[in-house]
Protein backbone atom coordinates (compact mmCIF):
# COMPACT_ATOMS: atom_id res chain seq x y z
CA UNK A 1 0.00 0.00 0.00
CA UNK A 2 1.27 3.46 -0.81
CA UNK A 3 2.04 5.85 2.02
CA UNK A 4 1.09 9.52 2.03
CA UNK A 5 3.94 10.34 -0.36
CA UNK A 6 2.76 7.77 -2.91
CA UNK A 7 5.69 5.42 -2.44
CA UNK A 8 5.47 1.79 -1.43
CA UNK A 9 6.37 0.53 2.00
CA UNK A 10 9.28 -1.94 1.84
CA UNK A 11 7.11 -4.91 2.85
CA UNK A 12 4.33 -4.15 0.38
CA UNK A 13 3.83 -5.71 -3.03
CA UNK A 14 1.34 -3.02 -4.07
CA UNK A 15 2.31 -0.91 -7.08
CA UNK A 16 3.60 2.61 -6.52
CA UNK A 17 0.87 5.25 -6.65
CA UNK A 18 1.19 8.78 -7.98
CA UNK A 19 1.91 10.93 -4.88
CA UNK A 20 -0.70 13.56 -5.74
CA UNK A 21 -3.37 10.88 -6.17
CA UNK A 22 -2.35 9.25 -2.89
CA UNK A 23 -2.54 12.61 -1.10
CA UNK A 24 -5.98 13.39 -2.55
CA UNK A 25 -7.45 9.97 -1.82
CA UNK A 26 -5.92 10.02 1.66
CA UNK A 27 -8.20 12.99 2.28
CA UNK A 28 -11.13 11.21 0.64
CA UNK A 29 -10.65 8.19 2.93
CA UNK A 30 -10.44 10.57 5.90
CA UNK A 31 -13.95 11.79 5.09
CA UNK A 32 -13.55 14.59 2.54
CA UNK A 33 -15.47 12.54 -0.03
CA UNK A 34 -16.29 15.51 -2.25
CA UNK A 35 -12.66 15.49 -3.41
CA UNK A 36 -13.12 12.11 -5.11
CA UNK A 37 -12.48 12.50 -8.82
CA UNK A 38 -14.81 11.49 -11.64
CA UNK A 39 -13.27 10.94 -15.09
CA UNK A 40 -14.72 11.82 -18.50
CA UNK A 41 -13.62 11.49 -22.11
CA UNK A 42 -12.55 14.97 -23.22
CA UNK A 43 -15.18 14.92 -25.99
CA UNK A 44 -17.66 15.94 -23.29
CA UNK A 45 -16.30 19.45 -23.88
CA UNK A 46 -17.21 19.53 -27.60
CA UNK A 47 -20.74 20.62 -26.77
CA UNK A 48 -19.43 23.71 -25.00
CA UNK A 49 -16.78 24.52 -27.59
CA UNK A 50 -19.59 24.75 -30.16
CA UNK A 51 -21.82 27.07 -28.11
CA UNK A 52 -21.67 30.82 -28.65
CA UNK A 53 -20.57 32.65 -25.53
CA UNK A 54 -19.23 29.58 -23.74
CA UNK A 55 -15.49 29.41 -23.19
CA UNK A 56 -13.48 26.27 -22.64
CA UNK A 57 -10.17 27.44 -21.20
CA UNK A 58 -7.07 25.43 -20.33
CA UNK A 59 -3.50 25.45 -19.15
CA UNK A 60 -1.26 22.40 -19.49
CA UNK A 61 -2.99 20.43 -16.74
CA UNK A 62 -6.23 22.20 -15.75
CA UNK A 63 -9.19 23.77 -17.45
CA UNK A 64 -12.53 25.47 -16.97
CA UNK A 65 -15.88 25.61 -18.71
CA UNK A 66 -17.26 29.13 -18.31
CA UNK A 67 -20.80 29.87 -19.49
CA UNK A 68 -22.62 33.17 -19.97
CA UNK A 69 -25.48 31.91 -17.78
CA UNK A 70 -23.17 31.92 -14.78
CA UNK A 71 -21.97 28.42 -14.10
CA UNK A 72 -18.36 27.32 -14.31
CA UNK A 73 -16.69 23.96 -13.84
CA UNK A 74 -12.99 23.41 -13.22
CA UNK A 75 -11.35 20.18 -14.35
CA UNK A 76 -8.00 18.44 -14.57
CA UNK A 77 -6.52 17.31 -17.87
CA UNK A 78 -4.64 14.03 -18.35
CA UNK A 79 -1.17 14.11 -19.88
CA UNK A 80 -2.46 12.87 -23.26
CA UNK A 81 -5.38 15.37 -23.36
CA UNK A 82 -7.88 12.51 -23.84
CA UNK A 83 -9.32 12.39 -20.32
CA UNK A 84 -10.51 15.13 -17.99
CA UNK A 85 -11.55 14.81 -14.36
CA UNK A 86 -13.45 16.89 -11.83
CA UNK A 87 -14.27 16.51 -8.17
CA UNK A 88 -17.54 14.88 -7.21
CA UNK A 89 -18.39 17.94 -5.09
CA UNK A 90 -17.87 20.36 -7.98
CA UNK A 91 -19.96 18.19 -10.28
CA UNK A 92 -22.79 17.98 -7.74
CA UNK A 93 -22.69 21.63 -6.71
CA UNK A 94 -21.71 23.52 -9.86
CA UNK A 95 -22.95 21.47 -12.81
CA UNK A 96 -26.60 22.36 -13.48
CA UNK A 97 -29.02 19.41 -13.32
CA UNK A 98 -29.85 19.82 -17.01
CA UNK A 99 -26.19 19.33 -17.94
CA UNK A 100 -25.65 16.16 -15.90
CA UNK A 101 -27.09 13.65 -18.43
CA UNK A 102 -24.67 15.02 -21.05
CA UNK A 103 -21.69 14.49 -18.73
CA UNK A 104 -22.89 11.02 -17.73
CA UNK A 105 -22.72 10.04 -21.40
CA UNK A 106 -18.94 10.52 -21.27
CA UNK A 107 -18.11 9.18 -17.79
CA UNK A 108 -15.13 6.82 -17.59
CA UNK A 109 -13.92 4.43 -14.91
CA UNK A 110 -11.62 1.47 -14.52
CA UNK A 111 -13.31 -1.93 -14.95
CA UNK A 112 -16.03 -2.31 -12.34
CA UNK A 113 -18.41 -4.94 -11.01
CA UNK A 114 -21.85 -3.93 -12.21
CA UNK A 115 -23.43 -6.26 -9.67
CA UNK A 116 -21.54 -4.63 -6.80
CA UNK A 117 -22.54 -1.16 -7.99
CA UNK A 118 -26.21 -2.20 -8.05
CA UNK A 119 -25.79 -3.62 -4.54
CA UNK A 120 -24.40 -0.28 -3.31
CA UNK A 121 -26.98 1.89 -5.05
CA UNK A 122 -29.73 -0.44 -3.83
CA UNK A 123 -28.82 0.34 -0.20
CA UNK A 124 -28.01 -3.18 0.87
CA UNK A 125 -30.06 -4.96 -1.76
CA UNK A 126 -29.13 -8.63 -1.70
CA UNK A 127 -28.38 -10.33 -5.01
CA UNK A 128 -27.64 -13.92 -5.90
CA UNK A 129 -24.03 -13.68 -7.02
CA UNK A 130 -22.78 -17.22 -6.63
CA UNK A 131 -21.26 -19.07 -3.71
CA UNK A 132 -19.17 -17.19 -1.16
CA UNK A 133 -15.62 -18.54 -1.13
CA UNK A 134 -12.08 -17.63 -0.12
CA UNK A 135 -10.04 -15.66 -2.65
CA UNK A 136 -6.66 -17.37 -2.75
CA UNK A 137 -3.65 -15.15 -3.40
Image (cartoon, rainbow, N blue to C red):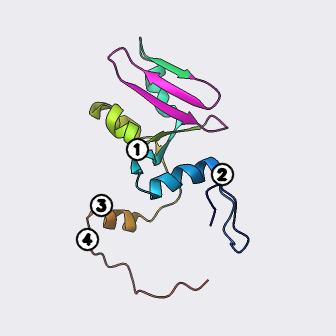
Mark 1 and mark 2: span between their CA atoms? 20 Å
Q: Secondary structure at mark 2?
A: loop
Q: Which mark is residue 125?
A: 4
Q: Residues within 10 Å of mark 4 (few under 14, many from 20)?
A: few
Mark 4 and mark 2: span between their CA atoms? 35 Å
Q: Nearer the viewer, residue 52 or 79?
A: 79
* Relative to 54, 119 lies left or right: left
In the orientation shown, which residue stands out farthest toward the right? 10
Q: Is residue 63 magenta?
A: yes
Q: Residues within 10 Å of mark 1 (few under 14, many from 20)?
A: some
Residue at label 1?
A: 88
Give the x, y percent position of residue 6. 66, 56
Residue at label 2?
A: 18
Q: Nearer the viewer, residue 132 or 61?
A: 61
Q: Nearer the viewer, residue 47 or 93?
A: 93
Q: Which residues are magenta?
A: 58-81
Residue at label 3?
A: 121
Q: Secondary structure at mark 3?
A: helix
Give the x, y percent position of residue 2. 64, 62
Determine the image quadrant of residue 90: top left
Q: Secondary structure at mark 1?
A: helix
Mark 1, mark 4: which one is toward the viewer?
Answer: 1
Give the x, y percent position of residue 34. 40, 46
Q: Secondary structure at mark 4?
A: loop
Mark 3 and mark 1: span between their CA atoms? 16 Å
* Relative to 129, 37 lies left or right: right
Point 71% across, 75% down: residue: 11
Amino acid sequence: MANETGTRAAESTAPAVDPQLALLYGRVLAGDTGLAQVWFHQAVLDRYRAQTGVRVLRSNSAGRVRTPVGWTLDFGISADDQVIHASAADLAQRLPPGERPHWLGYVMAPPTSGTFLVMRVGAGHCMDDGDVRDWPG
